[in-house]
Structures are given as C-alpha cells and as structure tokens.
Image (tube, rainbow, N blue to C red):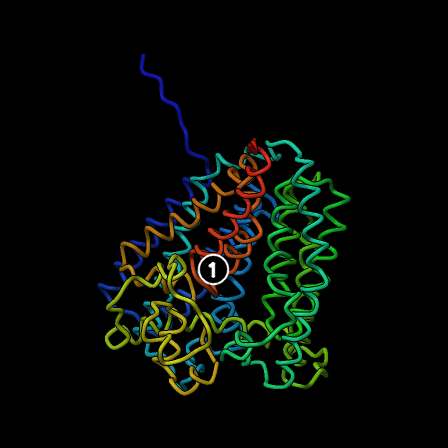
Amino acid sequence: MISFTWKYSIFQVIQIFIIICYFLQFLFCIGFGYNDVTINILQYELLLIFLWSLFSAIHESGTFNLYVLFLYMLCVFIYSRIFLDIYGLFNWTWADKYNDFIFPINVQFQILILLTFSLLFMHLGCLMGRKYLSYRKINFEYSRYLDKISTFLFLFSVPGTFIKYLIQFKAVLEHGYLAVYDGTIANLKYPIWTTGAISIFEFSYCLFLASKPSKKKFFIISSIFFALRIADVLKGGRSKLFLPIIFLLWYYYSFYSEQQKQKIGKLLLISIVCIILSQVLLEFRRGDVDTGYDSDLFMMFFSQQGVSLLVFAYMIFYKSTFVNTGLPYILYPLSLTSTFEGQSMEFVEQTNSLGHRLTYFLAPDAYLGGEGVGSSFLGEFWDLGLIGFLLMSFLAGYIIRYFEKSVRNTRVIMFLAFILVPNIVYMPRASFFPSLINILIFLFFYSLILYVPKLKIKFI
C-alpha cells in the first residue's frame, strides 16, 4: 500500500496558487494589452497581496518577527506611494526626485508587475522557511565573562562617544545636513582621547547581546545606548532613530516577551509615535520645529519615505542609458578596498554602489553637493536580470526566516545581530548585504576577546 505524506502548509499552497494566477494574468495582459484601468487593478492587487503576506506572516510568527518588521519597512519605503495613490492622496507615477515627469504607462506596468512578483517570491521563500520558526529560545548559555567585559568597554566608551556625537552635531549646525555626506563629517578632527570611542561603543553593545544578558540588565544598557544614539540622531538622519527602536522591539519580543503575538493596537501606537518623531526631526533639520498635527502629517511622512520606489522605477525607465558595465551593484558592500570619504568624482568613478552611481547619473551637481536618491535591494536584484531578480527575492524571504534560527543557536550570530537586523529591515532603502569590512573588523576583535584569555602563554 502506498502512503502519501502531505508536507506543505495551507499558506504555502495558497501562495503557489496566487503566483500561478498572477502569472496567467500577466500573460493575458501581454497578449491583449493594458490601459489605465489595468494599472489601477494592479495597484489594488499589490495592496491585497501585501495584506495577505502580512496576515499570514503575523499568523505564523507574531507581530514583531523579523520578517514581519521587514514587511512593514517594505510598505513604508517602497509601496507607500502606490497605496496612497489608491486613495487619491499622491500620484505614484510622478518622478519627482531630480526630475519632473510622469512615468509612461508601459513603465508603470513593468514596475507594478515586478514589485508584485518580487513580493510573491519573497513571501514564498518566507513560507518555505517556516520550519525555522520552531526555534523560540536562545540555545546557548549565559556568559559571565562576556557580560562583564562588554559592560566595562561600554561604560568606558560612553564619554568619548558623547563628545564625538556633539562635535558632529555642531558641524551639521554650521554646515547643514549635507555635511554628513559631502565629506565634512568624515574629515572632522576630534580630541585624541576619543579615538575609536564610537566603534568601541557599538562593538561592546554587540558583545553585550552575545552574553545572553538578563532582562533587567538588557533594559539598563539599552537605555544608555539609545540615549546616546539620540545625540547622533540630532545630525538629521531619521534612520538612526527608528532602526534602534525596531531592533529593541525585535530583541525584546523575540527573547523576553512571553507573548509571541502582540495586539495590533500596540503596534499602531508605536508606529504613530515614530511617525510624529520622524516628522519633528525632519522639520528640526530644516530649521522649523512647528510641524503641526494636521491630517497631512501622515501623508507627508509616507510620501517622503516612499521616494525609495524611484530607485527601482528609474532603473526600469532608464534601462537603455543607465547601464552597469562593472561588478553587480549587490556586491558593493562586500568590497574590502572601497572607502567612503565624501561624494566626489573620484569616488563615483571607482565605486559600484547603486545609490551613488544612480544619483550622479540623475543629477551630477546635486550628487557632488552631498545629496542622494538612496539605494534599494530591489534595484540591486534587478541589476542581476529577471531570473536573478526572482531568485534573489525568494532567497531573501528564506534567508530572513533562517536567520531566526541561527541567531538563537549561534552566539557569534547573536553578536552580529545589531548589524544584521537593522540591515534586513532597512534593505528597501539600502543594500541587500551589510558592510563586509565592518563585520570582519567586529569578528576580529570578537575572536580576540573570546579566545586570547584561553591561551596559556609561558614566559621563560
């Protein structure tokens, strides 16, 4: 007698069915044509597929799982303008960054189709990695040694870090926000006693997390860490505000909270607070702290953050003129030789960074002045061709799920979590890979601290 074991979940089956239906619809549009009505339908379909992805992910893993947090950021940075357009609040087809035109309908069609296929394949990869969700608790022991040495290094680095943040903030007040990107900050002079303070500050916090700290001490050290990061936030980079918040939410609800699935009201409250703080920070950077609390605040936030959609859209629109003849853009963070000291002709000519190359292509003068359009992992995937785009989308969802297992089983991955988690949730506005050179430097000193005390050195 032949036995048959069904190994797929209902969510996986539904996802595969949606992909097949969407592919058939795509063939129909190619064969019979498309118009403005088709574009509107595709917008609604993207919204529905996003809501389905969010619902099924939350159902399987909870409100603050890493993949769910990634979906939130994907909506904010990539989909928000499209969703605002559904309600008549913003025209997503408007190319308003360094340009002023409406994308033609064939480009609109390509953008929506590719965005939806990317989401479908990412979520399929996520669902295929659901087996890793069985790993809930940290499976390595508390390290008293790492706890003590990380706390010492952390507290030791606090004064120097605070002074360096204040010096940088003063430079931004004098030269403007673009000083962060035009080389001004990179070339500042600091008191010699602050040398390496920020690096030690961040390294020691990563080391502290790897020790598997108690809940109480986690809150104490994290509060100090976050308080100092506020000084860094004053330079104007809003990501420096919400990325640590997202990391703290992920860490707390992954390892300390008894409830895996949080109430949606708590998420909405956190989101509203972050949006208001973000807009206050933006107006502060512009020199006007009177943001008001009118109905336009949230629309402004999402339309401004949704500018990252243009990175992908511009790559499709300018595909015949913006051509990559060098290494794939996705490999840029893995370079061990490229060092950023400000936006310049010399840097843009030798880099394979999508954000730098695209901004210079669109507006050379603006680029040299320190401005930028940003980057996006979707643009990096598209640079690999259609097959690479779909394959990498699938792998992205699967890898995020796999990370949830490895971070609980391996201390060194937990050590890198503060680098990897913000990188994952920020991929819609940045690169797919984190900076390899930063990881290697951190790992070198991690190994030094972990293994040197174990060496038995005999002096004759």
For the point 62% across and 72% down, the residue is 190
Residue 155 sits in which quadrant? bottom right
Q: Nearer the viewer, residue 392 or 85?
A: 392
Q: Quadrant of residue 290?
A: bottom right
Classify 10 Å Cα crowding around label 1: few (below 14), some (14-19), many (20 and above): many
Q: Is residue 215 above or below residue 427?
A: above
Give whichever of 445, 250 is nearer the camera: 445
**Up-down: is 7 above or below 20?**
above
Q: Residue at x 36, y 21 (%)?
A: 4
The spot of residue 41 in percent (x, y) is: 41, 66
From the viewer's perspective, tell me whether residue 313 is left or right of residue 169: left
Residue 456 located left or right of residue 226: left
Q: Image quadrant for the C terminus?
A: top right
Q: Is residue 289 visible?
A: yes
- Residue receiving disc 1: 427
> Quarter of the image holding residue 107?
bottom left
- Name the quadrant of the N terminus: top left
* Residue 406 vertical position relative to residue 427 in the rendered view, above or below: above
Residue in front for this viewpoint, 48 or 205: 205
